[in-house]
Amino acid sequence: MVNCCGLLTAKKEPVPLTHIEVELQVKDHVATVISTLKYENKEDKPLEAVFVFPLPGDAAVCHFSAQVGQTHIVAEVKEKQQAREEYDDALSSGQQAFLLEESEQSPDIFSMSVGSLPPGESASIRLEYVTELAVQADDGLRFCLPAVLNPRYQPQGSEGVSVQVTSVPASLVPYSLSFCARVSAPRPVSKVESSSSLEPLQYLNTDQTQATVKLAAGHKFDRDVELLIYYKDAHQPTAVVEKGQASAKPGTLMGDPVVMVSLYPEFPQSVLSSPASCGEFVFLMDRSGSMGCPINNSKWQETRISSARDTLLLLLKSLPVGCYFNIYSFGSRFEHIFPTSVEYSEKTMEDALKKVEQMQADLGGTEILQPLKHIYSQPCIPKKPRQLFIFTDGEVGNTKEVIDLVKKNSGSHRCFSFGIGEGASSALINGMAKEGGGHAQFITGTDRMQPKVMQSLRFALQPAVEDISVTWNLPKKVSATVLSPPITALFQGQRSLIYAQLSGQISQSAEAAEGFVTVKYSLAGQPSQNQLHFSLKSAEDTGLTVHRLAARTLIRSLESEEGAHRQQQNKKLKKKVVELSVQSGVSSSFTAFIAVNKDSGESIQGPLLRRNVATAMFCSTMRSAPPRQGPMMMACSAPVPKMGALKKCRSKRSAMSAPPMNKPAEDLSPKHSHRDPLLQLVSLQKASGCWLLDAALASALGRTSEEVEKSKPGPVNKEVWATILALIWLHAFNMDAKEEWELLAAKAASWLRAQNVSATCMDAGNALLGCSVQKDALGV
């Protein structure tokens, strides 16, 4: 059976999918998602409805069933080809059948086929999956229910048949969504935010550890639904032990208890306060046509490529003196600014910025594999660890091939990836970061790219953690088999998850059922460790969530290993994946869920009409107008703020620091004269960290050149005065955006410390700008 779809809406045919109902159950940092899809055949002939849709790339699909009239049919996991043949045989016999399968190219795309739905008949499809929730820069846990599935670009000469996506502009999605979430955790739930309108958060108990929230009524499933969940004291290590399935054989993954350990490493402050200055920073920027789309559908004028240009400006200004860097961009072909990475200096930085300003979304398709191969072919610079930053809207058909290449070269670099806009592939973005020992970020809704990217730069500047090992101390006759791949990256405050199968005789008494796990590593040449003591008693009411996530983790590891082998070994690994998938009931790229209604009585007669259900498409190279979307909304017991912190920050910049209505400096281009005041100031900083005293700086500070010159204390060096003013301005008027400018300000402070700045200079700067920033606050 081939997954190919025509354009549904062009024929004005009825849409068999009418409504989607989603129930989200969050327990600490793990989510269970139950989706009910309601189909109705309003035509006079039997239908086959095919729906190609996205799911989170690391989701473990563990249940698929259908309700037709009074008949309930539960699907089984079977080898994919066998499942397809059973489905086709059922349709040929006039039986109702249901098939759910994962794309072989990308684990975040699924295809659902509802076959032989008689005229006038309705069917409810229940789909269930579990997933881990990623930790964001502000310690929130991110859940995303994907709605947008942009057509995936299939690179030239790539192997395999890609899944063809039926899509319509997001505003024309013909089915609706109802969504409710229940959150429970050992710690109080402080707030829940979303890019969509929410009803008020409802607490279910007095200690606020349980709460529910719903989407506001009338929501169309025309964009991704993102929830950000915040707990008090989020960085608490935990361990959950889940007992095995009673019907499963002891000694198997599903029959034995499984423990899920969540660790948040804490690094010594002495290491974090002195970031590594050595390194090679390689930036790879997507310039395919879809990067010309808006970064979110409430601000049509701010495109993905324009936001990326601003982000590259911040990155280049924040790089440490003594590093090396280069910038690549790609579409159907790729370009680079320098033939090889160059040393960071005023000249190389300015040369790069001139090229960055000219970048447009004008390079065609999304051929990410070739520039990656070229980057990896370049020899690494001795004693300069390579840090690779990849920016893409993630619409490629060769996801697994790209991830395999990153994994193959993981020993020579760390990879930080950024998914831009609605529809970015979570499998691609998360997979590259995971295999490259880095960190993944998604920029959707009203997010700003800059703070998320700067957090990743701070991670990249941390010394690489080496010699990571995990040891278990358990009672006698109890052993742990680790199911997760080895930990390759640790970052301050970022969670690391470990799954392990527990074998042997586990006592359930309070005294004996205890153990601990220790993660040892070397950081900046110093041995360190983090340890978690936990109870081996099984947690109550966890179902099989931990087992399914563990099975998914192991399946993904085997699939990755399978991709690196060929022929005989390939077959053995594939057989292992199929066996594990069938045993655990968790989907894989080699299996599918198949359900056949054998009790439907008479065979369904007549030719079977195929109807392809359209998925939301946010943007395809600017061909469609943007749908409307509201601002980031918050659900909490307190009044809802009108804007998020970053929005307030940008309003404050405009109100408190806008340049006066005088003639702009002659060396400012029209682009610069309308630039955000913060970015305007940042663009003037030199590679060494200082600023020059000129008309452009005065304009960025909202003052005239005469005011700035006259206020300078007589003996003070002009560059020192300019740099003091810039730092005071940042601290006085832009603290809400500190994560964006913190690194470049630290570089400026370091430059100032060598200049012996006086208190008189600080007082004069405060007087000029009308604030009272202390010298210590600047780090000088």
Image: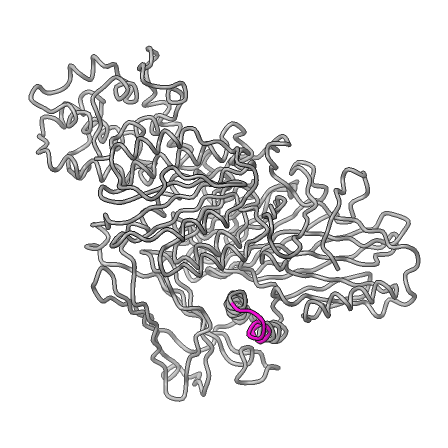
Question: What's the residue at 15%, 34% (across, down)?
Answer: 752
User: In the image, is 600 to the left or to the right of 651?
Assistant: right
Is residue 641 one of those drawn in magenta? no
Quarter-of-image position of residue 761: top left
The magenta region covers 565-573
Q: Residue at x 23, y 22 (%)?
A: 769
Q: Is the residue 316 above or below the residue 78 in the image?
A: above
Report the front residue among 71 and 366.
Answer: 366
Give percent across and percent down for residue 267. Answer: 26, 59
In the displayed image of the protein, which residue is found farthest to the left? 715
Q: Which residue is found at the position 36% from the left and 48% from the top?
A: 456
Front residue of this view, candidates 438 and 285 = 285
Q: Is residue 756 above or below residue 103?
A: above
Q: Is residue 533 above or below residue 638?
A: below
The image quadrant where one finds the C terminus is top left
Residue 556 in the image, given as x and y percentages of width and height = 53, 65
| Number of marks | 0
Q: Which one is in front, 607 or 686?
A: 686
Left or right: where does residue 276 sit relative to residue 133? left
Judged left or right of residue 777, residue 295 is right
The residue drawn where x is 25% and y is 61% is 523
Q: Main secondary structure of the magenta part?
A: helix
Q: Is residue 541 visible?
A: no
> How is the model colour-coded?
one colour
Screen quadrant of the N terminus: bottom right
Q: Position of residue 158 (x, y in %)?
A: 60, 53
Does the magenta segment cover residue 570?
Answer: yes
Q: x, y (%) of residue 32?
A: 56, 61
- Residue 19 seen in render: yes
Nearer to me, 727 or 190: 727
